[in-house]
Amino acid sequence: PPVIGVCGCVAQQEGSSLLERSPSVGFVLGPGQIGRVGEAVASVRRGERAVLTDFDAEREFNFNTIFRKSETRGMVTVVEGCNEFCTFCIVPYTRGREVSRTLDEVLAEVRFLAASGLKEVELLGQTINAYSCPSSGAVFADLLESVAAVPGIHRVRYITSHPRHFDDRLIDVIASNPTVSRYLHLPFQAGSNRILKKMHRRYTREDYLELIQRLRDAVPDINLSTDVIVGFPGESEGDFKQTLDLLERIRFGQVFAFAFSPRPRTPAARYEGMVEEETKKTRLHRLFEITDRISSELNQDLIGATVPVLIDGDSRRDSRHWQGRGDDNRVVNFPKTGREAIGDIVEVRIERAGAHSLAGHALIDDARLPVLSDVS
Ligand code: SF4
């Protein structure tokens, strides 16, 4: 019979109460114990339910490569946990304090992924740019530079950056290294300084705007995405309008916006001034109207451009087309020509644009634009 386990931050927080509430759940596993998933399944098969939610503050990484179903992209965790304690977030409680892997270990894993034929690597961490190698003291800019130099790796993405840890050296590494993706996910969460303070984000809207300016001066083609929380406790119409104003000013390629939802045992769950659900819904709707318009406009601007697309697989809508991503992480669909395959990087001329994807034609018949997978 199948074994049912609940894993992740909620599992960490709820622990054995999940077993009490649900007789069909066999095990509960916190994020720090993911390397013990086999052990958990084995105990359920022996007839014992398991709760594995401890984590050691002095812990080291207990897992290696994350295998996801992808022929093109590998994911490598470089930092686990978080020290930021944003008042709405459970991560510091459920995943513990920040722990970085050594640079050597990360590089060994990236080399392994490159040797397996993967062209793109995505580095993962809750606050990835707070990375600090426990043995050499290398910072995230050093790590990014070293990973980008691994032979066979054509693209390096990284997620998630915190504005507070973004320095000029990191901007330089992105600007001077074409293997580093022209995509940056940089959550700002709220456009009002009053709300940012209540969130304990430790930057102001002015800091954020100034950082984006420095980034765009150095990397003009960077595609930015962000996270926004709508309806944080005490958010007034004026605060919300400041969020909309920031979105209009910065013009993100993609915005992940969520209505505030209180997480148990976080400070914000006890704050006064909870915003009505109806108001949150309306605000989210207003926000998406703006962000969809901006994404469409930014995508329209790319019509006529030629972008290098790493082919991920068949297009979801039509198997006669490929789907892939540009080096700025935008989704691009184009008709198959029969000469390219999954994992190739192909130049595509963009002809159409929507809010969420681009479409065009491969230029591989053009002698000046060969399929880049032939190039080492
Ligand atoms: Fe850390 Fe991000 Fe959670 Fe803030 S929102 S505590 S930075 S994981």
Image (cartoon, helix red, strand yellow):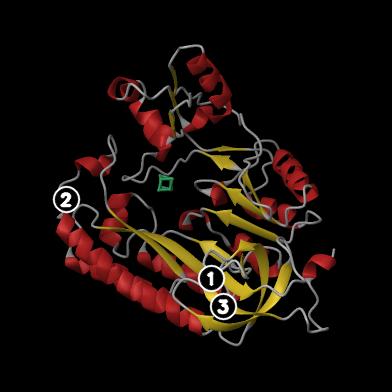
Q: Say which of 60 and 293 sits in front.
A: 293
- Tell which circle, 2 or 3, labels the residue nearer the N-terminal end: 2
Q: Amino acid at mark 2?
A: Met
Q: Is residue 146 visible?
A: yes
Q: Secondary structure at mark 3?
A: strand
Q: Amino acid at mark 3?
A: Ala
Q: CA–CA distance between discs 2 and 1?
A: 33 Å
| Above or below for 196 versus 326 | above
Q: Nearer the viewer, mark 1 or mark 3?
A: 3
Q: CA–CA distance between discs 1 and 3?
A: 17 Å
Q: Say which of 298 and 92 sits in front.
A: 298
Image spot of residue 79 (x, y percent) = 57, 42
Q: Which mark is residue 223?
A: 1
Callout 1 touching callout 3 (CB < 8 Å): no
Tag 3 residue: 359
Residue at 31% x, 51% y: name it: 199
Callout 2 touching callout 1 (CB < 8 Å): no
| Above or below for 256 versus 45 | below
Q: Residues within 10 Å of mark 2 (few under 14, many from 20)?
A: some
Tag 2 residue: 274
Q: Residues within 10 Å of mark 3 (few under 14, many from 20)?
A: many
- Tell which circle, 2 or 1, labels the residue nearer the N-terminal end: 1
Q: Is residue 217 left or right of residue 193?
A: right
Image spot of residue 243 (x, y percent) = 30, 67
Image spot of residue 69 (x, y percent) = 62, 47
Q: Which mark is residue 262?
A: none
Locate the C terminus and report the quarter of the image it occupies. Answer: bottom right
